Amino acid sequence: MNDYNSSRRQFLGAGAALLTGTLMANGKLWGMPAIIDNFGKSGSLIKGVQIGVITYSFREMPDQSAEATLQYVRDCGISAIELMGGPAESFAGAPKNPVDFRTVFPLMRKRNEKQTLTPEEQQQLDEAETKMKAYRAEMAQWRATAPISKFEELGKTYKKAGVSIYAFKPDAFGMQNTDTEIEYGMRAAKALGATQVTLEHPSNDAHTLKLGKMAEKVGIKVGYHGHEQQTYTFWDTALAQSPANALNLDFGHFVAAGNPTPLEMVKKYHERIVSMHIKDRQTKANGRGNLPWGQGDTPIADALKLIRDNKYNFPATIELEYQIPKGSNSVEEVKKCLEFCKQALA
């Protein structure tokens, strides 16, 4: 089993935690059923392929509330999503994250890419991590008594607006989280209507065993996400440990990692893939860039056709990670990604 290096673990763990509650609105704008009912149901089920989006794609948008997130999704024409923890937990009354994710995340990425941080940037990261340590403790206490009924309410509201939630990704499943938090996250996912929870693969066999067994009891799947440490055998131990353990395959990262036949990976594991992230990355030989769709080396169109032609039943999840062009925003770029999918499947 390949391991993350220490900077990768720091980056992913802190990044997920930051996403949990950053910039959450206080909920005062929620409760506008007339507007929600008029959002329409354009849908993103194309030729039998469910195109979704992870709401992480909207991380640069100014309002991260549950209502605003729903608006972004509907504006894109998407009808199914992988929901990050922040909007849902904020709606349920979670404490507000004291760290400004939009400011700190670029510094985390810079550190992860081994770029030199200025003394001021390093100090800013150190202060953020100190705040996050206290915030995690506060969140653990809140999750112990969090109202699951609020997640049921949110799931029904999204469904009424024509958006289903197939996956939930709160920062509740790491090795630093308590068993109470883990079970809470799984039960919250079911309340939202999700069939799976997702997290970065912890590269720890004992932890994937524990997560799989807990998921079996709750009745939900655990989709493990990978980055450039993905290989053709990366998930094998977790899959053998529990029928609840599964793949949240990142197709673009898999290509960037240097794996030469990504479509074969999809064919081999299609029965254990619960969702697949799609982005257009370059191969290792070409620099591993993350580019606007159609400009990289990832065979996105071929993968979508493979899902269509073989009637695989997992969603293809748009994950917007390339640099947003000046004058555009996350919503407009996700729309472009969806249009790419429509053209590929036409």
Image (tube, rainbow, N blue to C red):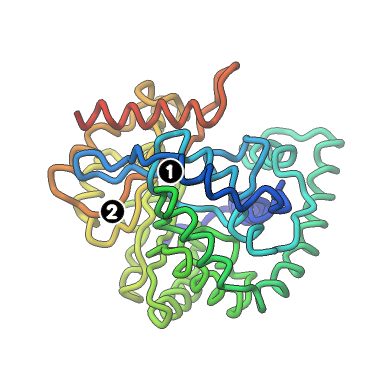
- Asked if one can make out residue 6 in the rendered structure from this viewpoint, the answer is no
Give, as a three-letter code, the residue at label 2: Phe
Q: Which residue is mark 1?
A: 53
The quarter holding residue 284 reads: top left
SS label for mark 2: loop
Q: Is residue 37 left or right of residue 269?
A: right
Classify mark 1: helix, strand or loop.
Answer: strand
Earlier-in-chain disc, 1 versus 2? 1
Q: Is 34 placed above or below 344 here?
A: below
Q: Residue at x 53, y 77 (%)?
A: 183
The Cα–Cα distance between marks 1 and 2, rounded to whole angstroms, is: 13 Å
- Residue at screen point 63% across, 35% down: 60
Residue denoted by label 2: 314
The quadrant in which residue 105 appears is top right
Q: Position of residue 287 (x, y in %)?
A: 45, 27
Q: Which mark is residue 44?
A: none
Residue plotted at (45% across, 79% down): 214
